[in-house]
Image (cartoon, coloured by chain):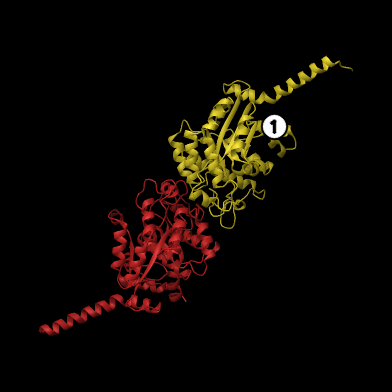
Chain colours: A red, B yellow
Amino acid sequence: MILDTRKLNTLIVLICLMFISNTISGQENLATKLGYDANAKLLIIHADDLGVSHSENIASIKAMESGSVNSGSIMMPTPWVLEIAEYAQNHKDTHDLGLHLVLTSEWKNYRWRPVSSKEMVPSLINEHGYFHAGCTDTVNVKEVEVELRAQIELAYAMGIEPTHLDSHMGCLLWTNQEIFKVYVKLANAYNLPCLIESSFSNLFASESEFNEFLKSENQEVIINQNFTISEAEYANGSESYYINVLKSLKPGLSQLLIHPGYDNEEMRGMTVDHPEWGSTWRQVDFDFFMSEKCETILKDENIILVNWRDIKKTLKK
Amino acid sequence: MILDTRKLNTLIVLICLMFISNTISGQENLATKLGYDANAKLLIIHADDLGVSHSENIASIKAMESGSVNSGSIMMPTPWVLEIAEYAQNHKDTHDLGLHLVLTSEWKNYRWRPVSSKEMVPSLINEHGYFHAGCTDTVNVKEVEVELRAQIELAYAMGIEPTHLDSHMGCLLWTNQEIFKVYVKLANAYNLPCLIESSFSNLFASESEFNEFLKSENQEVIINQNFTISEAEYANGSESYYINVLKSLKPGLSQLLIHPGYDNEEMRGMTVDHPEWGSTWRQVDFDFFMSEKCETILKDENIILVNWRDIKKTLKK
C-alpha cells in the first residue's frame, strides 16, 4: 500500500490525537468528576511528615492556613502526633490530612518505635526497638500489615479522620510487590484513596496484572505526576525547581510533596549530620510555599488546587 | 532528784552535743568516706529529665560543661534519649548520669510509651498506649518491675553506664511501699546507689522496718536534704529561692533537683498549657546555674560539689 503525503499527514495527526486523548483520559475523568474542565491543571501541594517534630507541625499548619499548602499526611508513631491529632479534631470538616504510613525512623539521635508491640513486629525494628533507618525488603509482610493497621486504628482512636494514605520515604511504594499490595489493600479496607502512580506497575509482571490488582481493591492511579525535589535539584536551588514545576505543569492531577519546617534548634538537632531533607531544606520549602511569588505563579498558570478530601468524596462514596 | 543550775546547763549542753553528733553521723561517714571534712557542706546540683527534648538536652549539657550543674538523670522512654546516650558514650569516664526511671508521660501534646510492650504492662498505659499523665497506685507492681528493668537494660544496651537511679515525678518514691521496694531492689540488683530520703520511712510501719529493708538491699539514706523548687517558690522568684537554699545549706550531703532548658519553640510546645515546670521555668533554672552569681555563692559558702559517680565508687565497690 502506498500513501500519498496528504494521507500520511492526516494519519499522523489522527495518531497524535488518539495518543493525547488516551494520555489525558484518566485526568479528564477525574477533573470532570471533581467539577473542573477536562484539561484543567489540578495540583495538590502536600506537606509530608506531620507529627515528626513541633517545628514541622507549626510550620506546616502555618503553610496550610496562610500559604499555598493545601494537604498533608501524619506519621502516627512520631513524638508530636498528638499535636496534629488535636489540630485535626479542631478542623474536622476542613482539614485535608492523610496518614503517612511509617516503616522507618531515619534520624540519628531522634527516633520512634512501632505502634504495635515489638514482639509482634520483630522484623521491623533494630536492637533498641526503633524502626530501621531505611526501607528494606527484609521486613516480614505480615508484620508490615499488623503495624500499618495499628497506625490506622490509632489515628481513628485519636479522632483523626484520614482523607488518604501515603507512605513515609516511599517504603510501601517501591520496595516490593507484596508490601505495595498490603498498602493498597488497607486503603480499600478503610475506603480511602491512596497515592498510586502508574510507574508502580513496574512491581508487577505486566500492566494488566497491575491494573487488575488495583481494580480488585477498588483503587486506581489518581496522580498523573508526582513531584518531590531531589538532592541534586535542591543543590541547584529549590526555588527555581519549584517555579519550574509550577510553570511546566501539565493538565491532569499532579502532586507536589514538600517538607515545610522551621530552621530552629529542634529541627537542627533532629536532622543533625543530614543536610538532605535537613533543617534549612525544610525552611526553604516553608518560605517558598508561603511566598506571594508562589501564589502569583499558581494564579498566572491557572493551576487549581484540589485536595484528597474532594477526591475521597468523589471516588469513595 | 534536784539538779543545780550549773549541772542542768552541763546536761543540756551534753544532750545538744549528742543530738548534733547523731544528726551528722551519717553525713560524717559519707563525707569522710568521700575524703572531706566530717562537717563539709556537700551538694549535688542535678539536672532532671534528660532526653525529654532537644532543648532540655542541650541546655543541660551546657549547664554541666560550663555552669554549676554536675549531675543529671536520663529518661529512657523519651524521644531524645539517643542524643544523651551518644553524649554519655563520648564522656564515659567523666559524666555523672543516672536513670530518671519513668512511669508517666505528663505533657499534653507530646508523650511517650513504655519501653516494654503494651501487652506486658497494660496497667501502666492509657487508651493510646502512652504512660498515664500522673503517678497512680493503680499500676500493677509486677508490671512496674518489668518496665523499669526494660528501661535499665535499654540504657546499658545504648552504652550508658548509669551512676545512680532516681524517679521521674517521684512516682517510685511516694506512691506506695511496694513500688518503692521495686525501685530499691533494682538499684541493688544493678549495684547502683539511688535517691533515698529518710522521710520515705513513712511508707513503712516503723523506722526500723524501713532501715531493715534498706539494709537487706544494701542501700542506705544518702541524701540528707533534697531540694526542688515548688510552684509557690517559683512564683516568689526562683533566684531568691536558689540563693536561699545555697546560703542556708547545712553540713551533710544535699541535692538540688533542677530542670534546665531553653525557652524556645520546642519547649513552649512541649509545656503548652502548663506553666509549672514550663518553658520559662526551665530557662530560669538554666540562667541561674550558668551564672557567676551562683558560682560565687558556692565558693563563698564553702559548698563542695560532689557527684553520684564518687558516691557509687565509695559505696558500691
Is A210 left or right of B82, judged from the image as shown? left
- Residue A47, visible in the rendered structure: yes
For mark 1, what is the residue? B212
Instruction: Locate residue A283, reporting x and y percent.
Output: 38, 54
How many C-alpha atoms fall within 10 Å of the one at disc 1: few (<14), some, or many (≥20)?
some
Q: Which element type, helix, strand or loop, lies under badge 1?
A: helix
**Percent from the top left, x then y, of residue B215?**
66, 30
Q: Quadrant of the N terminus of chain B?
A: top right
Q: How many marks?
A: 1
Relative placement, left or right, of A189 versus A224 is right
Q: Is residue B10 above or below residue A138?
A: above
Residue B241 vs residue A235, the one in the foreground? B241
- The relative height of residue A241 versus residue A310 in the rendered view (above or below) is above
Depth check, front residue: B114 or A73? A73
Question: From this viewpoint, which residue is outermost toward the right?
Answer: B1
Q: In this rendered view, identify the residue nearer to me: B49 or A174.
A: B49
User: Quadrant of residue A192 in the image?
Assistant: bottom left
The type of residue carrying mark 1 is Glu
Residue at point 48%, 42% (across, down)? B57
- Residue A177 is situated, as x and y percent measured from the top left of the image, at 36, 63
Marked residue chain, label 1 = B
On-image quarter of the C terminus of chain B? top right
A210 relative to B40, above or below:
below
x, y percentage for residue A176? 36, 61
Residue at 60%, 40% in the rendered image:
B238
Against B224, residue A258 (above or below) is: below
Q: Is residue A101 visible?
A: no
